[in-house]
Structure formats: structure tokens, C-alpha cells
Amino acid sequence: MMKNGTKRKVKPDRVVKRFCRKGIPERYRARVWMDVSGARKKMKKSQKNFYQTLLEQPNQDADFEEELTESIKTDLDRTFPDNIHFKNGIDSNKSKQKDLLNILTAFGRHSPTIGYCQGMNYIAALLLIVVKDPEQCFWLLCALIDDILPAYYTKSMIGLRAEMNVIDDLVREKFPEVQQKMDVYKVPWTLVASKWFVCLFVDVVPTEAWTVLRVWDCLFFEGSKVLIRAALCIIYNVKPAVLSCKGMPDVVQTFKDVSKNSAILDCHLFMQQCFIETNPLTRADLKKLREKNRKLIEEEDEKYSQKQRKSRPSR
């Protein structure tokens, strides 16, 4: 398919979808991600040297620019501190921290309504490790946040909050015994699963296990539905442990320990389970669940806003 390495564009079709599910070879991963995600198309449609221009032209709002830079720099040293590409500090020629800072700064300036949110650092860092070219990493980050993911990174995080309710609905349907435990011990999915979606499973499952990259192979092609499948698959694999829990701390610790679960660390087995054990899960049904839960959250937020306005003393 790759024609011995020639630079033919990879067109999304059923064959490519099947191959993505089986795992993209490492030497082709960057190229395929750029093509199937729409990132290369975004890059070609942009003005010339757009990425470099963003780096050279700070936002006119000085307060925004200061907050953006401080927020990103705060997380730099926390990002893969033991990884050879990031552990030497921003001033080292061997470190990718400077590239990471540039990617996140460029995105914040490109999308000031979002700016920078925790979790983006891990996503951009893994993109750098795999793709290596900072400009391509920037466009892949844009494709993810602008086009592929729900509104996980807005100030209200409405997309993420709705996603947690969707997980609640689906677990109640597919793994009712697990949801019963979560209800009895009053463990909200936000507490144990929000990081999965904010970081796209980076720093949840060890990257050296390849599971995260295999999930991303499908994410860039099939969209955010794959994240729901991956979350349900994790829950499926820890179900026996959850059912044996004796309280809220046990449940929380069980989900913290997913990085040690042998089935999750086996990327081939995990991806097979993702598309078998989570069925049925149609795109139409997921869309309805997301819309329903987003509407409920919007209504809750509006009620809260009205209550806040009423409680303010009149002048």
C-alpha cells in the first residue's frame, strides 16, 4: 500500500481502516496520521509559514500571553520526566522541551478561546516522539482539538463532562454490576476516568506497551468514538477487580492500577477486545447519548447561573 515508501497520500477507505485497527507500522505512522486525520489538508490550506508566524507574533493581549506561557512552562518538567527526549531540561540540545513549548504556544495563540489546558502537554509530547517534526505535530494537535474531539478543553469542559455521563450510561447498560458498585460507593466516573480522555490515555497506560499508539492509530482515522471503546474496554478488563472492592478507596486504586493490567498492556489483545467486547456501539447511538448529556449539562449550568445571579445583592 505504501508503494515502498513513495509519498503517495493515504486515502481513508475500508482497507486503510482495517489496517489502522491492526496497527500502523512505526516508520509510516506519522505519514498516515497526517493523511487520515485531515492534518495535512489543514496545513496545506493555511497561509504560508503559519506555524512559524504564530511563534514569532505573540497575542496582542499581554495578560493572555503571560498566562499562556506560565501555564505551559509549569507543566514542561512534569511531562515524561524520565523520558530521554524530555528529561534534560529546556536548555539542552538533546531535549525536545523547547519544541514542546513552541507547539503548545502556537496552539494557544491559534485558538485563544482554549489557550492551554493540562493534558495537552502529554498529547503534544507523544506526537513529538512519534512524528518528530514540530510543525506537523502542531497540525495534528489542531486536527484533534478542532475537528476530532468533543469540547474537552473549553473553559466549561462541557464535552468532557458530557463524556463522563455517556460512560455512566454505557456502563449501566453493558456492565451493570460495575455501575452498581460505582453507585453504592459513590464513585463518579469523573474521578477515575476524566484523565483518560483529557490525556487521550497517555500517562494512563505506559507508552512502551504500544497500547496508546494503537488507540491513536484508530482515533485519527475513526474519530473520538474509539476513545469510548477504549474506556469501556479498560472497564471490561478491571471488572473482576472492581466487583471485589470493599469501598471507594479500593475502587479508585483499582482504576489507578490499570497500567499494570496484563490484558491492557497487551496491545493486540486490547484492540481486539475494543471492537468486540464494547459492541453494539453505533455512531448514531453514541451521537444521541452525547447530545442528550450535553443538553442536560447545559441546563444544569444555566440553572446554576440563574441561582448565582439571584443570590447577588442588588445595588
Image (cartoon, helix red, strand yellow):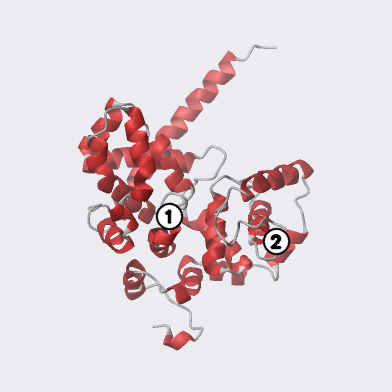
Residue 300: x and y, percent?
45, 28
Q: List x then y, in percent, for residue 244.
A: 23, 34
Q: Residue 166, can we see it?
A: no
Between 45 and 116, the one nearer to me in the picture: 116
Q: Which mark is residue 245?
A: none
Q: Amino acid at mark 1?
A: Pro
Q: Residue at x 29, y 51 (%)?
A: 233
- Please say if 3 is above or below 179: below
Residue 99 appears anywhere in the view: yes
Q: Which mark is residue 92?
A: 2
| Quadrant in the picture for the C terminus | top right
At x 63% / y 54%, what residue is drawn? 104
C-beta proximity under 8 Å, tags 2 and 1:
no
- Residue 24 x %, y %: 40, 71
Q: Nearer the viewer, residue 115 or 265?
A: 265
Q: Judge from the rendering whether residue 39 lies leftward or rightward of residue 66; answer left or right.
A: left
Q: Position of residue 276 (x, y in %)?
A: 23, 57
| Residue type for callout 2 | Ser
Q: Is residue 204 above or below residue 135?
A: above
Q: Based on the displayed image, in which of its 4 quarters is residue 102 positioned?
A: bottom right
User: Is 177 left or right of 233, judged from the image as shown?
Assistant: left
* Residue nearest the observer in this picture, 218 or 100: 100
Q: Quadrant of residue 154?
A: top right
Q: Which residue sits at x=45%, y=52%?
A: 200
Q: Determine the residue positioned at 33% across, 39% down.
A: 254
Q: CA distance from mark 2 to mark 1?
A: 25 Å
Secondary structure of the residue carrying tag 2 is loop
Residue marked by disc 1? 206
Say what secondary structure mark 1 lies in.
Answer: loop
Residue 235 placement: quadrant? top left
